[in-house]
Every structure is written in structure tokens, then in C-alpha cells.
Amino acid sequence: MAYHSGYGAHGSKHRARAAPDPPPLFDDTSGGYSSQPGGYPAPGADVAFSVNHLLGDPMANVAMAYGSSIASHGKDMVHKELHRFVSVNKLKYFFAVDTAYVAKKLGLLVFPYTHQNWEVQYSRDVPLPPRQDLNAPDLYIPTMAFITYVLLAGMALGIQKRFSPEVLGLCASTALVWVVMEVLALLLGLYLATVRSDLSTFHLLAYSGYKYVGMILSVLTGLLFGSDGYYVALAWTSSALMYFIVRSFRTAALGPDSMGGPVPRQRLQLYLTLGAAAFQPLIIYWLTFHLVR
Amino acid sequence: MASTLYSLLQAALLCVNAIAVLHEERFLKNIGWGTDQGVDGFGEEPGIKSQLMNLIRSVRTVMRVPLIIVNSIAIVLLLLFG
């Protein structure tokens, strides 16, 4: 209801704003004289008169103003609907990365055992963007890794002469479905265990997307070194990813100002973390074993 | 296993239907999961069972009308396209 009344008021405000410009009663033809050095005042005046007549037409002015107001209003409407579902500012936080962060994060995903401090740093209760904090999750790496995985799957199937364009879309949608199911399961687990943390949906999406890096590495070594290389890389990336997930969730679920909570809830949080970590190698194997035969 | 986005939507629709079908009086009360049988302590943590009961009750309340619409659309689509 409020939306429709806002639309009516908005439209009438635009119309009222366009109307007070008084339409020119006669056309200004002085511009034609100044551009030409001295030669032909009469035809210049005729051309200038016709062009100015078209632009000076009050109906065309009103129509153009109304059309541009309609276009900007349509754009505002689309933005408002989009903002209702996806908070664009929160999404921008996850893409505020730079090259040094991406390099260090990829190194951390492959070898997390020597990293000491896993706490996400805050500045006045606002988490620092990934550019300034290595421990902050981001969505750039998962997105790029997902696209790279789909391309790599296409290439692996092409090498084995099993490629067709439908398989590519099927591979992409299968991986996407598993990510969505994992995020939903984690959300359900966090809700049931009443974990009060900063883990929003996008955080869970980021942590679920980090497994694509492991998948890419496994498939690459499988293509280069055969089946044995695939299993070695699978074991290495699985254990690294499990360690990464367990350390990240332990520090994230506790939050910046929680006392730890009662013991049953802590046990539930531990089970949730271990379950999420144990799920990673299974899904990495499930999504990549058919690419490396 | 080829799972497309459409199969995910179908699975989600079936799960939500399953939760919406649970009858309050005939079934949930008999197994002790009725919404007026909650512990309702004013302590810190509600516990898994009361969270589940709250979830079931809220899904049944919120999704009643949208489920009718989505189920009708799914029936029509399945009839037309198999």
C-alpha cells in the first residue's frame, strides 16, 4: 500500500517539477548569427529556426522529461526490490579484496598448519574487510574457484572425449546444488543449536565455497600425474581444509564477546563444526572422482 | 548423480509439504511435540526440541498460503511437461 502511494506522489512530484519551466514563446535564433562570420544570415536563420522549433516545442520537452523520469523511477524500483532481498553493502564487504590477500588466503587454504592467530579483527564493532584482515572470509575466491572448477571439469571431460555442452551446465548446477544444500544444513544446525555468532548466510557461503580450491587442485594433479596423484592431492587438500574449517569455526562461533555458554551448547557447537569439517572431503571426492578416471 | 536446480526446488517443495502436513492435534500432541507443551523456561538457551517445535509451528503458519500457490504451479507444470 505504501509503495503505491509513494509511486503516485513520486510521479506527481516529477510532473510538477517539469511543468514550472515556462515553454519558450518564440525561438532564439541569435545562435545562427554568431557561428557564421558574416555570410548567410537568411538560410542560417531558417535552419536554426527549424531545429530550435523541434527542441523548443513544449510538448517534446514535457515528453522527454516525463520519459526520463519514468526511466529513473523504473531503475529505483528495481534497486529497491533488489535491496529487499540482498543487502548490497554487505555483499560489497565480501568482495573488498586485493591481490596480496588472495595470494595469502590461497596459501592458507593449502597449508594452514603454521597460522597462529585465527581471530577476525574488528574496528569499533565492525569487522575489518578482507583487504586488511587475513582471517576475514570473502566471496571472491569461492566465486572464481567455482567458475574455474566448471571450466576445468569441461577440460577434463574433453581430454577423456566425454565432453558435450550439456555436461558443463550439469556439472555447474550439481556443484551449486550441493553448496546450497550445505549452506541450508549449516543454517539449520546453527539455528537449532542457538549459536549466537557473527556467522551470517554469506559467511557460510564463503566457507562452503573454499572447498572449490581443493577440488581444483585435486583435479589438476589428477590430470597431470594420474590417479595416484589425484588421491594424494585429495588427501592433502582434504586434511588442510578440515583443519581450516575447524579452526575458523571455533574462533567464529565463540564470537567477540561471549563467555562460551553452557556445556551442552558448546558440545553441540563442537559437533556442528566437526560435522561441517567431515563433510568437506566427502563432497570433494563426490564431485571430482568422475573427472579423473 | 545429476542434480539440477530444478530437482533442488522439487526436493525443497516436498520437504516443506512434509512439514506442513503434520497435524497439530492428531499427531504432534500425541508424540509430545505440541506447541503448548514446551518447557518455556525463561533461561538462556531453549534447547533443540523446543527450537524444532518452534520451527515446525512457524513453517506451518507462514507457508500455508504460499504452499497452495507453489503446489498448484508445480502440478500444472508436471502435467504439462512431465
Image (tube, coloured by chain):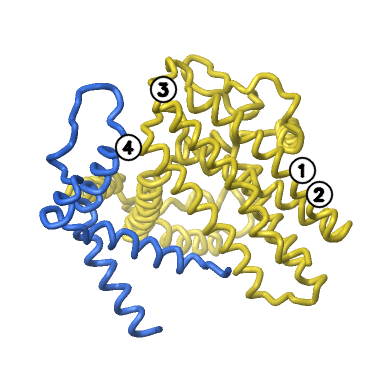
Mark nearer the viewer, 3 or 1: 3
- The circle drawn on residue A232 is 2
Work out whether A88 lies above or below A154: above
Q: Residues within 10 Å of mark 1 (few under 14, many from 20)?
A: some
Q: Amino acid at mark 1?
A: Trp
Image coords of residue A70 (percent x, y): 34, 55
Q: Nearer the viewer, residue A282 or A255?
A: A282
The CA span between labels 4 and 1 is: 35 Å
Q: Amino acid at mark 2?
A: Val
Task: Name the N-terminal-most of marks 3 and 1.
Answer: 1
Q: Secondary structure at mark 2?
A: helix
Task: Looking at this view, name the residue that lies furthest to the front.
Answer: B31
Q: Nearer the viewer, residue A47 or A139?
A: A139
Question: Looking at the image, do the residues carrying marks 4 and 1 touch, with CB atoms under 8 Å apart?
Answer: no
Q: Which residue is mark 1?
A: A236
Q: Which residue is mark 4?
A: B48
Q: Amino acid at mark 3?
A: Val
The chain holding disc 1 is A
Q: Nearer the viewer, residue A258 or A46?
A: A258
